[in-house]
Image (spheres, rainbow, N blue to C red):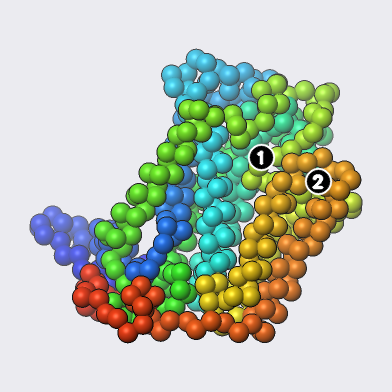
Amino acid sequence: MSSAHATSTYVPKSRVAKWFESRLPLVGLVHSSFVAFPVPRNLNYFYTFGAILIAFLGIQIITGVWLAMHYDPSAANAFESVEHIMRDVNYGWLLRYAHANGASMFFVAVYVHIFRNLYYGSYKAPREVLYLLGVIIYLLMMATAFLGYTLPWGQMSFWGATVITNILAAIPVVGDTIQSLLWGGYSVGNPTINRFFSLHFLLPWMIAGVVVLHVWALHVTGQNNPAGIPIKSSKDAVPFTPYATIKDVFAVVVFMILFAWFIFYQPNYLGHADNYVPANPSVTPAHIVPEWYFLPFYAILRAVPDKLGGVILMFGAVLILAFAPWLDTSRVRSCNYRPVYRVFFWVFTANAILLGWLGAKPPEGGYVIASQLCTAYYFAHFLIVMPLVGLFETPDRVPGSILETVTGPGKQVSGSGMPAGAAAEPAKRG
């Protein structure tokens, strides 16, 4: 955050503030990062999902800590302890529903965030490390969500844990070792739920640490924008506060209304009824499905008859995201000025949604064939479409500045709201 701190105009007023700032410039750091920091003036509401994600990370950690105070991570008592939370703990039902639905809202926001990044080319230089840190956060989120889904120890929790840990055994050399470490025995049981609970409690703090690095990297490179062009002058930018702050707060409030609707009116809509049945190793559910946010990858896993091949493709579908900065050969960032690639992007989006729908269907007949076709296109988008379209596409004219995207060519504005020279640092970053 050092380069962002250089733009700070914070001056301590009192003697105590000056004394503290000279020894630990914390207030100046916050001021430079979240008050005076210059952001492009053309940001839309898709750029508020970072703030929404930070808000939901806080909600998940707070509700998770309170739930952990009443939860018993044992195969004998886990299910009953969740029922105890729901029925006997003051506002336990609210904590549990907020935590369960908060996970779904977290993934809604992160998927919008990811697709916005892909659409506006936010993964391209110089933001590769910022983007890679985002992929790491996504992987940690997936691991945390899977571990958390097993903790209620209902039928779907138990069999979901059984299916996924059995799949891991297909990994050559290390698969059996990973499976044994997770199980803590010869099958999913009491040691397993203890391990899953410990890891589920640990990983959110790791996510929070990587989020700090993610925000730091954002302040080093500067924020991308819908035009995909850098800040070139103070007229291209506005201070983070109040402009971006007010927009972020408004978006968080609107998203919280949706969140509250699920909690109070449809708390179990995004879950599965079988999870209200205690885990029974001798009774297999008719149709084992993961939570909705894993369904596209579950469809990819089942699209391949070979167990190892399915595992490779499932993990590859997430890891291939990390290579987007080097697979995209276009010199233009934003899809707003890429008419050919924009069509392929929306086809890719529809394909991802279709994979999610297929993941909820039984693995038989036409559903398997459709899953195979969608899986093939998913990887083709990154390995074929991205490199080739970038080489042969003729982009539209890109505006000369961010200001031009707001006011139109040749027009001016009276003032930017930015201190003189405040946008100079991001302009150098490109």
Q: Residues within 10 Å of mark 2 (few under 14, many from 20)?
A: some
Tell me the quadrant of the picture where the C terminus can be found.
Answer: bottom left
Q: Is residue 324 left or right of residue 398?
A: right
- Could you say which quadrant of the image residue 317 lies in? bottom right
User: According to the image, label 1 marks what residue?
Assistant: 291
Residue appearing at x 44%, y 44% in the figure: 255
Q: Is residue 102 left or right of residue 215?
A: right
Total tally of numbered discs in the picture: 2
Q: Where residue 366 sits in the image (x, y, percent)?
A: 86, 48
Q: Nearer the viewer, residue 132 or 72?
A: 132
Tell me the quadrant of the picture where the N terminus can be found.
Answer: bottom left
Mark closest to the chain's N terminus, 1 or 2: 2
Q: Nearer the viewer, residue 172 or 307?
A: 307
Element under disc 2: helix
* Mark drawn on residue 167: 2
Query: Closer to the observer: label 1 or label 2?
Result: 1
Q: Is residue 94 left or right of residue 233?
A: right
Q: Nearer the viewer, residue 49 or 163?
A: 49
Residue appearing at x 28%, y 77% in the figure: 235
Label 1 – label 2 distance at C-alpha: 17 Å
Q: Is residue 62 at least partly visible in the picture?
A: yes
Q: Eyeballing the image, is 69 above or below 259?
A: above
Residue appearing at x 41%, y 53% in the figure: 51
- Could you say which quadrant of the image residue 420 lies in? bottom left
Q: Where residue 174 sits in the image (x, y, percent)?
A: 80, 53
